[in-house]
């Protein structure tokens, strides 16, 4: 049993249930996966076939020896029984139908250089007389001669986003094999088109 897969985030939608309720879902595109390598308790899976020039020469040569196409993404995924799979085998989204709850890992959206109001949820200064064009400033940053410096991890303006983030215990609502789509309840970090690493939920069903 494979405990995860690689996907691409397409965006958000909604799914109507049989009882009339509707839930917000994130739509993931799950291309065919290829078994690149077998290990004791893991499988190296590759997905997204690209031109050979899109990957570096060591990767290209390694995949050619195994009669595999050029794969953009290769990740190690935990597996209970790697011996049941063969190198070069193709896996479709049906191979992950046994997953109910998942943990997703992705990089958050990049927001560039941001101020403290957006980055740390600071309050603005009073928009009244006496405040001169510094309404979104962070205020004082240091002390007097003692200690005479700014402490580390001070909340200030700076680069915001593009951080590795994991969201746990998301439910798979539906798998549409013919369209290679997986609908996941709730929001998933990252921009549209971003790479998503999906694993079996640690807190629902045991460790990886």
Image (cartoon, grey):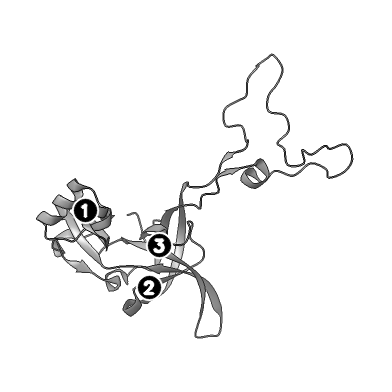
For disc 3, the neighbor class at 10 Å (few under 14, some 14 to 19, many from 20) is many
Q: Is residue 187 above or below residue 183?
A: above
Residue plotted at (79% across, 41% down): 125
Residue 13: give x, y in percent of width and height: 51, 73
Per the image, label 1 sits on a secondary structure element best described as loop
In the rendered image, residue 160, in percent from the top left (x then y), is placed at 55, 44
Horizontally, residue 193 falls left or right of residue 125, namely left
Instruction: Tell me the residue at 61%/32% (across/down).
Output: 154
Residue indicated by mark 1: 41
The residue to which callout 3 is attached is 102
Tell me how far mark 1 sits from mark 3, CA to CA.
Answer: 19 Å
For image coordinates 21% across by 63% down, the residue present is 34
Answer with mark 1 or mark 2, whichever residue precedes in sequence.
1
Quadrant containing the N terminus is bottom left
How many residues crowd around disc 1 within 10 Å: few (fewer than 14), some, or many (20 or more)?
A: some
Q: Earlier in the sequence, mark 1 or mark 3?
A: 1
Q: In this view, which residue lies farthest toward the front? A: 53
Q: Which mark is residue 181?
A: 2
């Amino acid at each position: 049993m494979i405990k995860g897969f690689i996907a691409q985030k397409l965006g958000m939608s909604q799914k109507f249930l049989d009882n009339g309720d509707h839930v917000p879902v994130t739509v993931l595109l799950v291309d065919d996966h290829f078994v690149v390598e077998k290990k004791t308790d893991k499988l190296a899976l590759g997905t997204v076939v690209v031109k050979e020039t899109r990957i570096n020469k060591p990767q290209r040569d390694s995949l050619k020896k195994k009669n595999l196409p050029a794969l953009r993404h290769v990740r190690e995924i935990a597996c209970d029984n790697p011996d049941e799979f063969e190198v070069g085998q193709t896996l479709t989204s049906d191979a992950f139908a046994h997953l109910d709850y998942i943990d997703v890992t992705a990089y958050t959206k990049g927001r560039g250089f941001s101020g403290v109001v957006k980055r740390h949820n600071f309050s603005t200064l009073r928009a009244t007389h006496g405040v001169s064009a510094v309404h979104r400033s962070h205020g004082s940053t240091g002390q007097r001669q003692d200690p005479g410096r700014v402490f580390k991890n001070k909340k200030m303006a700076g680069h915001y986003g593009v951080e590795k983030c994991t969201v746990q215990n998301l439910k798979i609502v539906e798998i549409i094999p013919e369209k290679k789509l997986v609908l996941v309840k709730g929001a998933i970090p990252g921009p549209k088109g971003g790479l998503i690493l999906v694993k079996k939920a640690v807190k629902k069903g045991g460790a990886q």
